[in-house]
Structure formats: C-alpha cells, structure tokens
Image: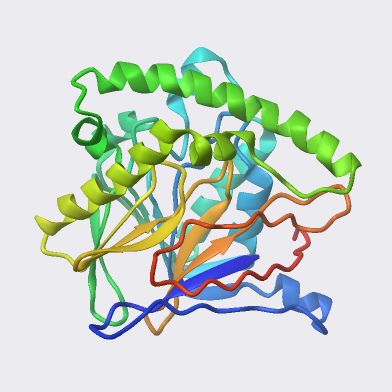
C-alpha cells in the first residue's frame, strides 16, 4: 500500500506525508484491520471487466471506518445495458459493503453518472444513506463537500450534448481498459510491475490533461457556493490532493486503474492510499501516484498484502 497524506489546512500549513513500512511484522499484522474515521471510494465500476474487485476487496477487508462514502459509479449500469457481466467477486464487494453497514458502519452512497438511476432512491435505509451530495465535517472541524463530479462536465466542456459525448468516450475508454490485462500479462512474464495504458493515455494526451486541469478548477469554484473548506469528488479517475485558493481539492481516484481511496484519521489527517491486485508472485503491485498538490512532499513506499 502507498500512502500520501495531507493534514487539514492551516494558514501556514503544508501537506505532509506518511510512510508505512512492513519489515519485521508478523503475518497477523497484515490481517488486523486498520481503523479510520472515514473513507472515500469512487468509480469501482462493478459490472465491467476493468473493475479491479480483488484490490477493492483487499481494501475493504483490511480497513474499518466509522463512515464509508461511495462517491459514485459503484455499479456501471451503462456497461450492464450493453452486456451482462457480474462475476462472484463483484457480488462479494456488494456483500462486504452491506456487511460493514450491518456491523455499524455508516455508508453514504452518492450516485454518479454511470449509476444515476440510483438517485431516484434517495433516502435512508438503516445505516445506508443515498444522497445527491453530502457535507462531511472532519475531526478538525473543516467542512467538506462530497460530490461525484459529473455535474461539472457541461461547465468544463461547454457542450450541451456532453452526455452523448460521454457515452462515446466511455466506449473508447473501455477499449483501452480491455487491453490492460493482456499488456500486464506480458509485463509480468518479464518481471515488470503493473502499468495502465488508459492511465498513460490520460496523462500524455494534451486534451485529456487540459480537461482534468479545467475540471479540478471548476469543482473548486463550484464548492465555494456551499461555503465549505474543501471538496472531494471522483469521476475523472485521477487521484489528487490540491489547493485552489482557499479550497482544498481531493479526488479519491478509481478502482479500474489506480485503485486508490482517501481515508481520514481521528486527527483529521486525510491520506491517499493505493492498493492493487496481487501479481502472480503473490506480491501487491503498487503503481506510482504522481497526482499530488504543488505543496505536497511526496513519499513513495509500498508493501505487499495477502488476501484475507
């Protein structure tokens, strides 16, 4: 697991980092769940072949939290409309989330564009809340707006027909994702780590980089109307911790490429953690996260985790 950490903002504060090392630990240490005050996951895209359910199950098994925010695109209804794909592991993810809710975890589900049908079921169901957006108050007292982020697509693109463009873009994105398993099968044969073609394309194609930058700035401006200190979203599959003026911007990434989540400790510290599916050698493959804010001091560390 990789961790990039940011303590909640102070006028003279900078982002800090945490390094976690596993040397000398017993096997029990790997199975003992870590506890967090809150956690945020988004864009799991259950129902697609690109979903990395193994890594997501690792995260859910190895961590406990008082509140779990599911920040949209939990189930990819767009993909399921085209073809039915629902392996046992995807069902296990749903069951794991429901089990955590039964055991007392507050689950807040904010639908995205791929699962927007769920919006019609907004309400409270035991420990599960379905909401269009949420305000999270950190342990240090800062208010954070939580949204999926697709609401800002039209603002960023300037296109009134953005939804149809999104459908077309999704098909191309799914094609790139479908190539990832083959590419990484070959890389593992040569002892190389995980690499995502779709993530590489986003980082290098000029229009994609420009869109991400505009999107992040638009989300930060959008949050100002809610009089909050920070905003957290998903949607663009690009994990980040950044500052935009007085607003802190957080993106918890996705579970098809980077396999990232955001977690909050009891002290209000927000950390970006990274999981990835186990390689054939049985060791977790941890890709590098380079989407951290300009003030961040980045420490890159990784450790292997066994399936529990």
**Residue 195 on image: x %, y %:** 69, 43
Q: In this view, does 152 lie above or below 299?
A: above
Q: Is residue 27 above or below residue 283?
A: below
**Residue 157 on image: x %, y %:** 25, 30
Q: Quadrant of the N terminus?
A: bottom right
* Residue 126 seen from this side: yes
Foreground pick, 33 / 305: 305
- Residue at 60%, 51% in the rendered image: 56
**Residue 129 on image: x %, y %:** 31, 52
Q: Determine whether, in the image, residue 180 is placed left or right of residue 93.
A: right
Name the quadrant containing residue 12.
bottom left
Foreground pick, 23 / 27: 23
Q: Determine whether, in the image, residue 151 is placed left or right of residue 281.
A: left
- Residue at 72%, 71% in the rendered image: 31
- Residue at 69%, 57% in the rendered image: 286
Q: Quadrant of the C terminus?
A: bottom right
Q: In this view, does 81 lie above or below 256?
A: above
* Residue 148 seen from this side: no
């Amino acid at each position: 697991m990789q961790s990039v950490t940011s303590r909640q903002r102070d006028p003279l504060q900078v982002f800090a980092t945490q390094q976690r090392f596993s040397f000398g630990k017993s096997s029990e240490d790997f199975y003992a769940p870590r506890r967090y005050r809150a956690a945020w996951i988004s864009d799991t895209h259950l129902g697609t072949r690109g979903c990395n359910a193994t890594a997501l199950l690792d995260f859910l098994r190895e961590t406990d939290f008082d509140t779990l925010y599911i920040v949209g695109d939990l189930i990819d209804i767009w993909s399921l409309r085209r073809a039915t794909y629902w392996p046992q592991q995807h069902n296990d993810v749903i069951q794991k989330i429901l089990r955590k809710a039964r055991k007392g975890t507050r689950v807040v589900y904010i639908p995205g564009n791929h699962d927007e049908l769920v919006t019609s079921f907004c309400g409270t169901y035991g420990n599960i809340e379905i909401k269009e957006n949420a305000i999270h108050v950190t342990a240090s007292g800062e208010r954070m707006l939580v949204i999926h982020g697709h609401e800002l697509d039209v603002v960023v693109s300037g296109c009134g027909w953005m939804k149809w463009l999104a459908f077309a873009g999704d098909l191309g994105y799914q094609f790139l994702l479908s190539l990832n398993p083959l590419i990484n099968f070959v890389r593992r044969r040569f002892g190389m780590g995980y690499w995502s073609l779709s993530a590489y394309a986003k980082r290098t194609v000029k229009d994609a980089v420009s869109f991400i930058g505009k999107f992040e700035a638009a989300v930060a401006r959008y949050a100002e109307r809610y009089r909050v200190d920070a905003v957290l979203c998903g949607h663009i599959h690009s994990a980040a911790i950044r500052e935009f003026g007085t607003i802190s911007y957080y993106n918890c990434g996705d579970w098809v490429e980077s396999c990232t989540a955001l977690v909050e400790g009891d002290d209000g510290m927000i950390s970006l953690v990274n999981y990835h599916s186990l390689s054939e050698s049985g060791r977790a493959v941890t890709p590098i996260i380079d989407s951290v804010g300009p003030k961040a001091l980045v420490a890159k560390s990784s450790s292997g985790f066994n399936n529990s």
